[in-house]
């Protein structure tokens, strides 16, 4: 069988099978890498959730000047005092709020919060409001003047995770900013905001009880390991079946060929 397997007759098939084996094994290794990344990410999220609240002020920004530090701090509890920049707030379309009375379509209200002593602001997810209140000047009813203290969790924008999102439209001639967005894109928002936006946003902690909008949600995060281990085993099984089955297939084909020539 080995002589037949390495004969010129099977050269092209051998090359195809070897390439397929390489792809299957690489897919299995890739899934294992994804599993290790997920485990490390989950550990970091748990550590951030258990850490004491971070006082986000000028001193904290100076000590954490690298943007990467904020990415590693996702789901960290934060307390920040500042002033809402209502003129720079935006809404996120197509957001659903549900309670015992059913579900309603609306928007999420996001307002930059200027951090005293800096030229930086953090975008605050203030919560869900009805669709009828989304446009200015109606939503000015939710404006808050003066200094406020906000507690919540650092979050990354959805555009950091999914590059296949349909982009928001570009500005029309004469427009200087977008007011209603399909996706939270902090890089684009920073370009239309008078101050510098931090590369993460703050999801405000829910008030108790919540009797009127904006309504906030408690963040949830799946700390499971996902299907990566199962997928890795699946790819390795496919590779093993191919590696063991191909020589048997060659042997049978050669046996049939010899029997037909006798």
Image (cartoon, rainbow, N blue to C red):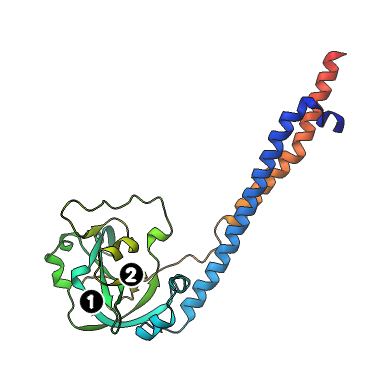
Res. 234 visible in picture: no
Left or right position of 90 against 67: left
Q: Position of residue 114 (x, y in %)?
A: 27, 78
Disc 1 to disc 2: CB gap under 8 Å:
no
For the N terminus, the image quarter is top right
Tag 1, which secondary structure?
A: strand
Q: Residue at x 86, y 30 (%)?
A: 3
Of pointers 1 and 2, the one earlier in the residue sequence? 1
Q: Residue at x 43, y 58 (%)?
A: 161
Quarter of the image where one finds residue 104: bottom left
Label 1: how many Cα within 10 Å (few below 14, some 14–19, many 20+): many
Left or right position of 131 against 9: left
The mark tally for this picture is 2
Q: Position of residue 222 (x, y in %)?
A: 48, 65
For the C terminus, the image quarter is top right
Q: Is residue 155 above or below residue 243?
A: below
Q: Residue at x 70, y 36 (%)?
A: 17
Location of mark 2 (residue): 217
Q: Position of residue 103 (x, y in %)?
A: 26, 59
Q: Position of residue 139 (x, y in %)?
A: 15, 67
Quarter of the image where one finds residue 193: bottom left
Location of mark 1 (residue): 84
Left or right position of 234 against 179: right
């Amino acid at each position: 069988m080995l002589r037949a397997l390495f004969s010129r007759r099977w050269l092209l098939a051998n090359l195809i099978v070897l390439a397929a084996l390489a792809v299957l094994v690489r897919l299995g290794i890739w899934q294992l890498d994804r599993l290790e990344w997920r485990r490390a990410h989950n550990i970091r999220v748990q550590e951030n959730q258990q850490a004491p609240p971070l006082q986000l002020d000028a001193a904290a920004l100076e000590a954490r000047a690298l943007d990467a530090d904020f990415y590693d701090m996702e789901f960290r509890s934060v307390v920040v005092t500042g002033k809402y920049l209502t003129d720079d707030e935006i809404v996120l379309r197509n957001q659903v709020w549900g309670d015992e009375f059913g579900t309603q379509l609306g928007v999420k209200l996001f307002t930059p919060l200027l951090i005293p002593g800096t030229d930086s602001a953090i975008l605050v997810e203030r919560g869900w409001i009805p669709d009828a209140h989304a446009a200015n000047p109606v939503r000015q009813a939710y404006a808050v003047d003066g200094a406020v203290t906000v507690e919540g969790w650092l979050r990354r924008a959805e555009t950091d995770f999914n590059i296949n999102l349909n982009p928001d439209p570009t500005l029309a001639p004469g427009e200087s900013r977008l007011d209603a967005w399909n996706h939270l894109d902090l890089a684009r928002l920073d370009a239309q905001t008078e101050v510098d936006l931090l590369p993460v946003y703050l999801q405000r902690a829910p008030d108790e009880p919540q009797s009127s909008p904006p309504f906030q949600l408690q963040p949830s995060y799946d700390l499971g390991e996902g299907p990566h281990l199962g997928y890795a085993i699946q790819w390795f099984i496919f590779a093993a079946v191919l590696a063991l089955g191909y020589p048997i297939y060659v042997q049978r084909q050669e046996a049939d060929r010899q029997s037909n020539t006798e």
